[in-house]
Amino acid sequence: MAQVQRTPLADQAAELLLERIRSGEWELGEKLPGETTLAPQLGVGRSTVREAIRQLAGRGVLSSRQGAGVFVTALDVREDWDQVLARADIIAVIEARIAIETEAAGLAASRRTPRDLHAIRRALDLRWQRRAGIEEHVDADTAFHRAIVAAAHNPILLELFDGFTPRLRQAMIDMLRIRDAHGSEADQHVHANLADAIAQRDAIAASAQSRTHLSSLADALR
């Protein structure tokens, strides 16, 4: 038989502190009162306060600075990235992709190596070869765009792109099934032009072409 579990005092204290931070009692960057002040306010011992602070530090809300004290580094707990994407409207996801890939395309044009360019060209060819099946085409298209983001040599941009991929994949498949049109020569030509701009180290053109392409994709989904 399941039993009611008592919540540890440190967990309760952490939640009370978090609620006070959310309510605006302390501003971003502000120093918290010391343990001797917080302990009686929360009705717990100093060791429990320390554990509560440690929990909130692990969740990104507080930061302990040696010799200086404890400071507010966020006004709420960061939400799990997968949950954010799962709830996000697909247009919002594409708009975020525009921000990421437009910058990545410009950086790729400036930073790409011969190996990067080979990977982009190869992904472009595979994108054309795999245009018959919708799922295969979507995966090949994603691989092409990922090759460009990888050529930007910014691990954060690549991590963000990879986070979007599962959320976007099914939406793209569904859209192409409804439209019953994909893998056209004109569409391939748009992607080839983007690859050419990167090959020519034209950062302005690469960014512009990436933005135009992804914006048209968002328009098609509206």
Image (spheres, grey):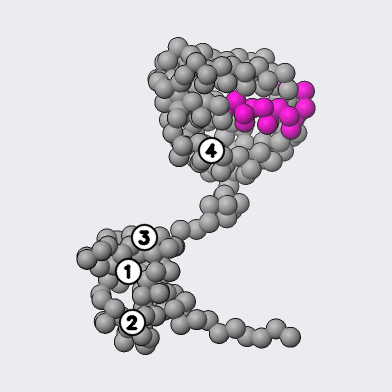
Say which quadrant the N terminus sits in: bottom right
Residue occupying the point 40% across, 20% down: 110
Residue sitting farthest toward the right:
133
Q: Where is residue 119 in the image (x, y as percent from the top left)?
A: 57, 21
Q: In this view, does 43 lie above or below 174?
A: below
Residue 219 lies in what quarter of the image? top right
Sequence-first disc among 3 and 1:
1
Classify mark 1: helix, strand or loop.
loop
Residue at image x 61%, y 39%?
A: 165
The earlier-in-sequence mark between 2 and 1 is 1
| Distance Cα–Cα, label 2 vs label 4 | 43 Å
Q: Do the residues labelled 3 and 4 touch (CB within 8 Å)?
A: no
Identify the residue position indicated by label 2 in the image.
46
Q: Does the magenta stretch include residue 75?
A: no
* Depth check, front residue: 32 or 186: 32
Measure the C-alpha gap from mark 3 to mark 1: 11 Å
* Residue shown at 50% from the left, 81% from the top: 8
Mark identifier at residue 74 = 3
Query: What is the three-letter code of the residue carrying label 4?
Result: Phe
Task: Identify the magenta region.
Answer: 131-145
Image coords of residue 90 (percent x, y): 59, 43
The picture places residue 61, in percent across and down from the top left corner, at 38, 63
Which residue is the site of mark 4?
A: 161
Q: How crowded is mark 3: few (under 14 residues within 10 Å), some or many (20 or more)?
A: some
Residue shown at the point (25%, 76%) measured from the top left? 34
Quarter of the image containing the C terminus?
top right
